[in-house]
Image: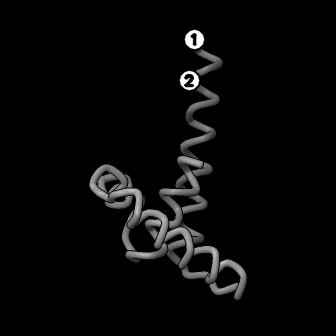
Amino acid sequence: MKIEKTKMIMKYFDVTYKVAKQYEIVLKDKQLQQIKAWYENKKETGLSTSREKSAEGIIGQGTNFQKKLDKKS
């Protein structure tokens, strides 16, 4: 859910991954619920942005990096 939340924030505010992570800290539950509702609506209509595709790439890189770190430990 954590990654999904970041992805939703990135798309809603049209910001980068780093900024979205900072937004996660400040946003309240009610605001996150509104963003989630908006995101689900957009997801159903099939609209995507270039930032969303970039987010998926960044998140994928982070996952790969984490796997490498786990192997070294």
Q: Position of residue 18 (x, y in %)?
A: 35, 55
Of residues 12 and 32, the one nearer the viewer is 32
| Residue type at the position of mark 1 | Ser
Relative horizontal placement of residue 25, taking residue 54 as reference (left or right)? left
Q: Which residue is painted at 62% across and 83% down in the image?
A: 42
Relative horizontal placement of residue 67, taking residue 54 as reference (left or right)? right
**Residue 20 in which image quadrant:** bottom left
Quarter containing the C terminus: top right
Mark 2 surroundings: few (<14), some (14-19) or many (≥20) residues within 10 A:
few
Which residue in the structure is indicated by mark 2?
69
**Residue 63 in which image quadrant:** top right
Q: Position of residue 72 (x, y in %)?
A: 59, 15
Classify 62 as above or below 11: above
Q: Are marks 2 and 1 in contact (CB under 8 Å)?
A: yes
Q: Which residue is painted at 49% across and 65% down in the image?
A: 33
Q: Position of residue 25 (x, y in %)?
A: 31, 49
Q: Position of residue 55 (x, y in %)?
A: 53, 63
**Label 2 residue SS:** helix
**Label 1 residue SS:** loop
Which residue in the structure is indicated by mark 1?
73
Of residues 19 and 26, the one nearer the viewer is 26
* Mark 2–mark 1 distance (CA, rounded to whole Å): 6 Å
Q: How many marks?
A: 2
